[in-house]
Image (tube, rainbow, N blue to C red):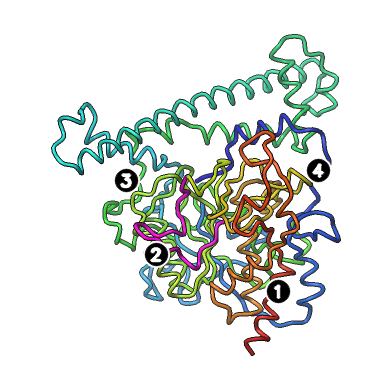
Amino acid sequence: MKKITIIAALFFAYTAVAQDKRPDNWFNLDHTKDNVNGVSTEKTYEELLKGRKSKTIIVGVLDSGVDYKHEDLKDVMWTNPGEIPDNGIDDDKNGYIDDIHGWNFMGNKDGSNVAKDNLELTRVYKGLKAKYDGKKEEELKTKDEKKEYKYYLAVKADYEKELNDAEAQMNQVKFIKTALDGMIEKIKKEQGVEKVTMANIDKFDAKDQKDKQAKMIAKSVVASGTSLDDLMDQLKEAEEQLDVSARYDLNSDTRSIVGDNYNDVNERYYGNNDCKGPGAFHGTHVAGIIAAKRGNGVGMDGIAADVKIMSVRCVPDGDERDKDVANAIRYAVDNGAQIINMSFGKKYSPNKKAVDDAIKYAQSKGVLLIHAAGNDGEDIDEITHYPCKKFENSKKEASNFMDVGALSWKPDDKIAAPFSNYGKKTVDLFAPGVDIYSTVPENKYKDASGTSMAAPVVAGVAAVLKSYFPELTPEQMKKILMKSARTEYKDKKVIKPGTKDELVEFGDLSKTGGIINLYEAIKMAESMVKVKG
């Protein structure tokens, strides 16, 4: 799973200048009324949609799993109408037993699940290494072997670089965490407190260099709007994400848990019905952005009011596998999803054709796919972020596929999230993706950042559009979402993602140079439907 790079997130937090915290529920607010680049959700319901009828839309969340019992999601979860819960029978004959709220392609029939997995880079390198390790190019006989050998060398170099970078980042995270833990323990003893606050840290007289650094980091992070508790949680999460043994281990065999014939990409009926799984933070957060129950006075409000969330688990802590992604798309399509959110991505795709075929299948069935552009601060016109809309060995692109960059709530030249991927040919538009408050497992709520958060904002907007204008095709929805995007920032200079202070025109970061807006999308849909009528 491609989450925001933790080290990058911490870097930007430490170097941030003190500023106001993001407005609550900012992604639903209005740029004119609330002076923040939200999608105008509340304004749209109040001014354009009040009293109008809508149709319930199923949105497939292809992710790490969704806590379908969450207080703010339980009423909006898709429930398979053809399945009798927990009877061990495939009642609707769709090939999946007891798939009540969705399916899990990373589990075994006995109920065990894959939690962590390695990177696709590791898997690709492992296969090539077994074939070419210790060989020289002059020993190879065919052109195909020599071509593949050169590819092997490139992959090997990439693997070694990433491994070294991950180890360096892990050491940095461990240093920061150890320094903060040490300072916190000293403060507890010196000041006789059980819980350390910023007032305690301000009072603390840091004498050695490690304590001085820890105090500076804590003060910088809190000044940027992140709490001390959240910082410690982020560091803990960073240790897990940068777990070299899990992501880069050439000897791991996590797939054996599933028990499928992994080499058969056409195999479809495997997994289990545990669509929450062991690590549902990411998927639950995504689901809440799209559809957390509106107006119930609990937690937060999602964007779409008449939606059912279908959870299809196919993304581990690590990189998703092409076979699972292809099957997850097909499962969602076959079971009624009209919009699919895909907040994941990777840099290698050995079975891209299987994913392409599934995307084409979704296209043929009238399903819109929303994909997160990625969090590496890179130009994905130059470096492909998979899955992608361009088909393998073809100039054609999927007409039902959108890539989404992440927008910050910060004003002026800081509106593009510093971690977001971009691309004038590839990324379609930008959507709110920084400090998004949403649902997380066990009836909790939390801020999270990433293009993973921006994609479900677009999926939510698309779901509202489809709900009130069910006759719209994926191509029409995509056209409306792009053409109605706000473009007043298009010619303005912003800090280029992935850089400290390099300025570019915001319009150079995506096809539209625009920011998604529900209000403008509904107005455009109304005019389009009237013209058609």
Q: Position of residue 116 (x, y in %)?
A: 45, 41
Vertical comparison of 301 with 470: above or below: above
Q: Amino acid at mark 3?
A: Ser
Q: Which residue is mark 4?
A: 21
Residue 249 image-quadrant placement: top left
Nearer the observer, disc 2 or disc 3?
2
Alpha carbons under labels 1 and 3: distance apart: 47 Å
> What kind of element bears circle 3?
helix
- Under circle 4, the secondary element is loop
- Looking at the rendered structure, the secondary structure element under dot 2 is helix
Q: Residue at x 72, y 52 (%)?
A: 491
Q: Are marks 2 and 3 in contact (CB under 8 Å)?
A: no
Q: Earlier in the sequence, mark 2 or mark 4?
A: 4
- Which portion, as a residue range, is magenta? 383-403
| Residue 172 seen | yes
Q: Give the mark nearest the N terminus, 1 or 2.
A: 2
First in sequence: mark 3 vs mark 4: 4
Residue 441 is at least partly visible in this image: no
| Residue 489, percent from left and from top | 74, 54
For label 1, the residue is 522
Name the residue type under label 4. Answer: Lys
1 or 3: tag closer to the N-terminus: 3
Of the numbered discs in the image, which one, if any, rests on residue 256? Answer: 3
Task: State yes or no: residue 343 in magenta.
Answer: no
User: Looking at the image, which residue is at 75% across and 36% down?
Assistant: 227
Q: Disc 2 versus disc 4: distance between alpha carbons?
A: 42 Å
Q: Are marks 1 and 2 in contact (CB under 8 Å)?
A: no
